[in-house]
Amino acid sequence: MTGPQLSLAQIRNRLVLTARTILRRHLPGSDGRCLACRIPDCRIAIAARDVLDSAEKVRQGRAPTPPDSNDPQD
Ligand SMILES: [Zn+2]
């Protein structure tokens, strides 16, 4: 449970632990499909990987890149 008494580092660590737990449950099987969802390219696993990537960038002092939904399309 997160609350205002936690430091940013503690919140980040909990997000990382949660993302790792999700990735362990949403591994691709031998057929390439998620073992939990039974679909290829599991969106839950992709989101968990994004959380881990962002948390690592924050840990290294680099700002995570925002979603590119507002990028202009040429
Ligand atoms: Zn899945």
Image (spheres, rainbow, N blue to C red):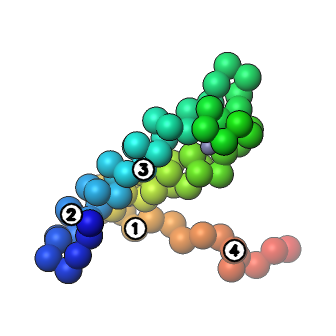
Most extreme residue toward the left is: 5
Q: Amino acid at mark 4?
A: Ser
| Labels 1 and 2: the sequence-earlier one | 2
- Residues at marks 1 and 4, CA–CA distance in whole angstroms: 17 Å
Locate ligand 1 by image quadrant.
Answer: top right
Residue depth check, mark 1 versus mark 2: number of the one nearer the observer:
2
Q: Residue at 60%, 70% (x, y): give it.
A: 67
Instruction: State the residue position of label 2.
Output: 9
| Labels 4 and 2: the sequence-earlier one | 2
Residue depth check, mark 1 versus mark 4: number of the one nearer the observer:
4
| Labels 1 and 4: the sequence-earlier one | 1
In terms of depth relative to the viewer, which is nearer, 55 or 73?
55
From this view, report whether residue 44 is shown above or below residue 68: above
Instruction: State the residue position of label 4.
Output: 69
Instruction: State the residue position of label 1.
Output: 63
Instruction: From the top left corner, tell me how far across and down residue 37 is, in percent.
Output: 66, 42
| Labels 3 and 1: the sequence-earlier one | 3
Most extreme residue toward the top is: 30
Helix, strand or loop status at disc 1? loop
Instruction: State the residue position of label 3.
Output: 19
- Residues at marks 3 and 2, CA–CA distance in whole angstroms: 15 Å
